[in-house]
Image (cartoon, coloured by chain):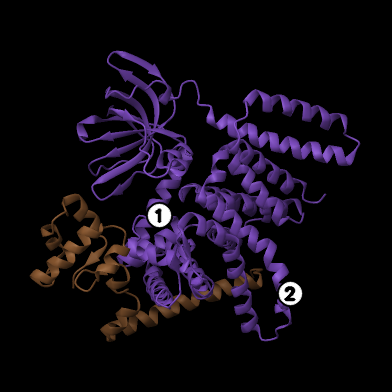
Chain colours: A brown, B purple
Amino acid sequence: MFNFTPEEKKVILFLLIIAFCGIILNNLAKLNCHIKKLFCPQVSLAKLDLNNISLEELIKTRCLSLKTSQRIIAYRLQHGNFSSLEGLKEVKGIGEQRYDKLKELFFVE
Amino acid sequence: MKRLFAASTLFYCLGIILVSCAKINFWLIFGLGIITFAAACLSFRNKFIFMISVFFLALILGALSLKNSYTRHKCQISNFVSYNDVVYNLSGFVDSEPEIKGKHTFFVFRVQEVQVDKLRWSCCGNVLVRLDFPQSLNYADSLILQGALRRPYVFSSASCSYRDYLSRQGIYLVMHIKNSLQIIPQLHKGGSRLIIFSFWLRSKMDEVISKYLPDLPAGILSAMVLGQRKAIPWLVNNSMVKSGTVHILVVSGFNVGIVAFIVNLLLKIIRIRRKARIILVAICLLIYCLATGATNPVIRATVMGLIFLLAYILKRNPDMYNSLAGAALFILIINPRQLFDVGFQLSFSSVLAIVYLYPKLERILRIDSCKIKILRFIAEGCLVSFCAWLGTIGIIAYNFRIIAPITVLANILIVPLATLITLCGFTLVLCGLFCPFLAGFLSTTTAMLITLLLNVNSVAIKIPGAYFYF
């Protein structure tokens, strides 16, 4: 009926396979919530953990000066882990504007 | 000479480089050009002298085009501006898709008229506008902006500064707006209707992606399929730079190929004739190029694709080098200063390295003799990745001060995954637009592949010696 080239046939088959995989994954996710981890990337892949980050790693981000990085670590040692990202505002040298940028970079569990 | 066009383009580029290094008068180059042209006409029958004249003429054309790009138009807005906190009223329209970064909005504004006090005059040129508040604006919205105009800051060294970067795009002024009262919307629309349609199409496609995928996979797919990088987290971008796989986050020739393939397939299913199909594919490629922001890699791939389609209609064999040269020439004629853009250099050097080195290395390593199909496929993948790495290593090391030996291995694993994701992404967008009941199933597989890609990448950069800055 249709005069498809071998490549076109392969693509059609491929699309059918991904739809098929999708149905199976959807079904498995409904039965087992751990399966969801397969298609929902962990937040640690996109952001840095503010409570576990070292001074070296903070400097490597190149978003903070050495002094501000040291202040963040000192604040963590003094007050314990950050309970929320808002805590960053209490660190000296981090204003509203800097905080807006940093909240894209870090997460707090 | 089979590749006269490619060789002429090379000389055109040399002309641009020569003039950027030495200060030569425009009219002197023009005079040289006339003499060379006369020599080419006189030596029409002498093949050797004619060839040399043509190459020299291409070199002079390159030099002239760069000199010409430095000359600003008489009505350029930057010619009328004094930098003394004078408040200007600029009339014109938004000439780019506004980008919202945190609390700021950035866009390029095409100026048509300027007013200072009661003095008003027509002018042209672009201004980069920064708003200190998020504002809902679209391409082609006509506005009157009130504010002071300044030259862009020089953030880094004078040879590669932010000011140079903007001037390469024809932007010589910036306007900083702090208050929404400084913006007066107008009723009529400016800009091109084709671009308005392309941006509308992109926003629809973006909506589909965000509707069916979680935030992070949606951001990555949006970058891979639509060239929208605003939702990519810094950490993801940075880890991909380290593994040398950041190229998958931009729209490139591969995406253009997929668009052409999918459109052709759909048109074939609805039984449209071959010639009409090719013309429709070409139109779709142009729309896709505009929708993704017409960046250098997309323009390169689109021009190459159009050359291939033309060759298909004319039933001629397209030459890879000539079509690559055609794409480079197309970009450089519009803006010769693009030759100094890192994106341009990376895009063309990687393709050139693959086209030139791959067949040679394949012959030396005798990959064809491998009888196991999967092994041959993997070896070919490694070789393509290796050639692209060789072609770009110098530019990357010079500009970004990073060498990433992991690139070859990371690309072998990540490029096939990215291929699958791009295919799934396009199918998801099409299904989301035309048959949403199927999109839900496709989105799960797409999200799973993106998660896998992120995990592979994060493992790759953790290998000791994966990358080093110098």
**Left or right: B281 with respect to B58?**
left
Quarter location, residue B448: bottom left
Tell me the residue at 88%/34% (across/down). Answer: B44
Q: Circle 2 sits on which residue? A: B364
Q: What is the C-alpha distance between the residues marked 2 and 1?
A: 40 Å
Specify the quadrant of the image occupied by residue B165: top left
Proximity of marks 2 and 1: CB atoms separated by less than 8 Å = no
Foreground disc of the pair 2, 1: 2
What's the mark number on residue A22?
Answer: none
Residue B363 location in percent, x, y?
74, 73
Whether residue B233 can be seen here: no
Q: Position of residue B287 (x, y in %)?
A: 51, 48
x, y percentage for residue B365? 71, 77
Q: Do badges 2 and 1 share one subunit?
A: yes
Give x and y (percent) for residue B367. 70, 78
| Position of the C terminus of chain B by quadrant | bottom left
Q: Is residue B84 left or right of residue B224?
A: left
Q: Amino acid at mark 2?
A: Ile
Q: Quadrant of residue B63?
A: top right
| Mark identifier at residue B228 | 1
- Disc 1: CA contacts within 10 A as few (<14), some (14-19) or many (>=20): many
Q: What residue is shown at x 39% (from left), y 20% (from top)?
A: B80
- Looking at numbered disc 1 in the image, what kind of residue is underneath it? Gln
Comes first in the chain, label 2 or label 1 = 1
